[in-house]
Image: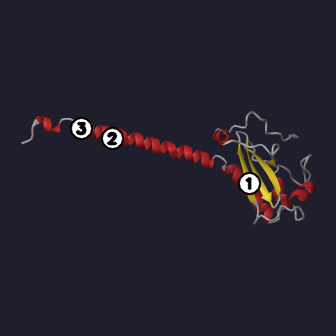
Amino acid sequence: MSSFLDQYGAGEERRNKLIVRAVLALLALLSVAVGGYYVLRNWKEQNRLSDFRALLEKKDYQGAYQHWGCTPEKPCPYYPYLKFLEDWGEKSGHTDFNTMQVVRKVTCKDGYGAGWKFGKDTVHLWVVREDQMLSYDPWPNWRQTWLAALFNDCSGMNRNLRIRTN
């Protein structure tokens, strides 16, 4: 026959285990959410660069030109279609995507930058978060520390320099 004190504290032990498990589950969920954010925060911008690359590989230069917010009918005032073909066309030196390397990535609140290295030449591209338009990175030699990248900090630099002609 069991006594009254044999079961003393058994309910409290179960409750403590439940609390510990709930706190650990919450911490695990929080760490997965934060990790997922930092892995996927540039997903749209990286896809935009991938789409641009795919169009260049297919030699669809007019489609690729539209990624810059320009069309052959309404070209960008400072980046006409012929200049685009000089930079990205058949004779540009930026056509061998099999050997291309991504050498630099920069994350900011207003955009995402990546450096594409073709042999000895590196092209620094910038995707504006607001409208997903491509441009050249205005500060290609700027380096971002891991702590600044963690907080999307570009030290107050205005990186959105595209001139709008509306």
88 relative to 52 in the view: left or right: right
* SS for callout 2: helix
**For residue 164, which numbered disc appears in the image?**
none
Mark 1 or 2, nearer chain start: 2
Q: Which residue is mark 3?
A: 11
Given the image, on which type of amino acid does mark 1 rest? Answer: Val
Task: Give the Cα separation between the discs numbered 3 and 1.
Answer: 58 Å
142 relative to 86 in the view: left or right: left
Q: Quadrant of the N terminus?
A: top left
Q: Position of residue 130 (x, y in %)?
A: 74, 42
State whether residue 72 is above or below residue 128: below
Q: Residues within 10 Å of mark 2 (few under 14, many from 20)?
A: few
Looking at the picture, the colour scheme in use is secondary structure
Q: Which residue is mark 1?
A: 103
Q: Residue at x 81, y 57 (%)?
A: 64
Q: Residues within 10 Å of mark 1 (few under 14, many from 20)?
A: few
Q: Which residue is mark 2?
A: 18
